[in-house]
Amino acid sequence: MRSLYKSEAGQRIIGHWCRARLDAFPVPHRRSLISVNGALAHVTFLGEEPARVVFVPGTNFNAATCLAVAEVLSSRWPVMIVDMPGQPGLSSGRRPAAPLRSWYGSMLTGVLDAVDARGVVVVGNSLGAAIALSCASDRIAARVLYSPGGIIPLRTDKLLMKRSAAWLLRPSLERSRRLLELFVTPGGAPPESTVAWMDLVARYCKTTLAPSPLTPALLHRWRDTPVVSAVGEHDRFLPPDRLAPVIESVFGRRLHVLPGVGHLAVEERPEDVVELVQEALDLTAS
C-alpha cells in the first residue's frame, strides 16, 4: 500500500479544504468514517436514513467537490455520498500500488454492508461508474452510469496531454482552469471551486487512477439488470458516437446523450441526474 499524497502536510491541506467546504454546506447532513478491510471511507449522509441513492464520485473528486449534485439528489431522495479510499479527500489516502477495480468494488461493498443499505440506486460518475460495475453487492437495485468510465478507453489528444503535463508539473490556478476547459462544453467556464480543487490536487497529490475498460465478462453480467447510462454531448473523453454502440451491445439499452454539457456534466447541469435516477427506479419496479 502507498499513499496518494506527496507529503503529510499536503494531506492536511487537502483535508482542511474538504472540511471547510462541507462545514459551509447549508443542506443538513452528517458525516462518518467507515472502516472497510483496514481502510477508512468517508461517507456523507443527506436526508433521512436509510439512503435510497448512493453517489460515487469520479477520479480526484469527493463529496466536498460534488455539493451541487448532492443538493439536487437530496431534494428528492435520502442520499449517501461515498468518498473512495485512495482518492483525494477525507478517506484513507493509501491504496494498492496498482489498484484494481476489484479493490474499489470491494470497498463499496463494505460500505453498503456497514450501513445495511437495501435496494439502493448507485450513481457512479466517471471512475465511480467503473466502481459501480465492479461492485457485485446484492444491496444494489440499479446503477446509473454518468460520464461512465470502465466501458471504453478514454480518448486523449495532444492538447489534453500538453495541458495535463503543465497542470501536474507547474501547478497554478490558470493551468487548472485551462485543463478543465477541456472537460466542459466548448466555450464554457469550469466552476471556480473545481478550478481551486484541481490546483490543490496537482500540488499535493500523486497521479491518481484514470478508469480503463473492464473485462467484457464483468460488463455483460449486468445486462439483465437495471442500468441507465448518460454522457455529455461534448464529452471529449467519451464521445457519444463511440460510447453509444457499446452501451447498447453490453446492456441492451440506449445511451442518454445530454445536450450542452461535456465530461463534467454532473457539475455543469446537476439537475439532469434526477431524471436518470427516476428512470432507474422505474426499471426496478417494472
Image (cartoon, rainbow, N blue to C red):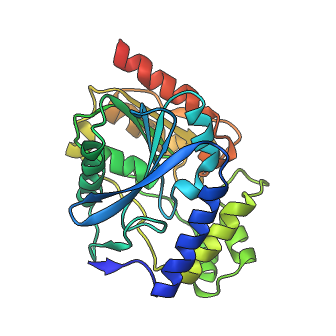
Q: Is residue 229 above or below residue 90?
A: above
Residue 225 location, x and y as percent? 29, 27
Q: From the viewer's side, name the closer residue of 22 and 254.
A: 22
The outermost residue toward the top is 286
Residue 122 location, x and y as percent? 39, 38
Residue 149 seen in the figure: yes
Q: Is residue 74 above or below residue 279?
A: below
Quadrant of res 133: top left
Residue 257 seen in the figure: no
Q: From the viewer's side, name the closer residue of 11 and 126.
A: 11
| Figure quadrant of the C terminus | top left
Query: What residue appears at the point 46 percent right and 80 percent down from the top-left corner?
Result: 206
Query: What residue appears at the point 26 percent right and 73 percent down from the top-left corner?
Result: 96
| Figure quadrant of the N terminus | bottom left
Query: What residue appears at the point 53 percent right and 41 percent down from the top-left corner?
Result: 241
Q: Is residue 174 above or below residue 120?
A: below
Query: What residue appears at the point 65 percent right and 83 percent down from the top-left corner?
Result: 171
Residue 225 lies left or right of residue 81; in this view the side is: left
Q: From the viewer's side, name the closer residue of 53 and 257.
A: 53
Residue 213 location, x and y as percent? 34, 54
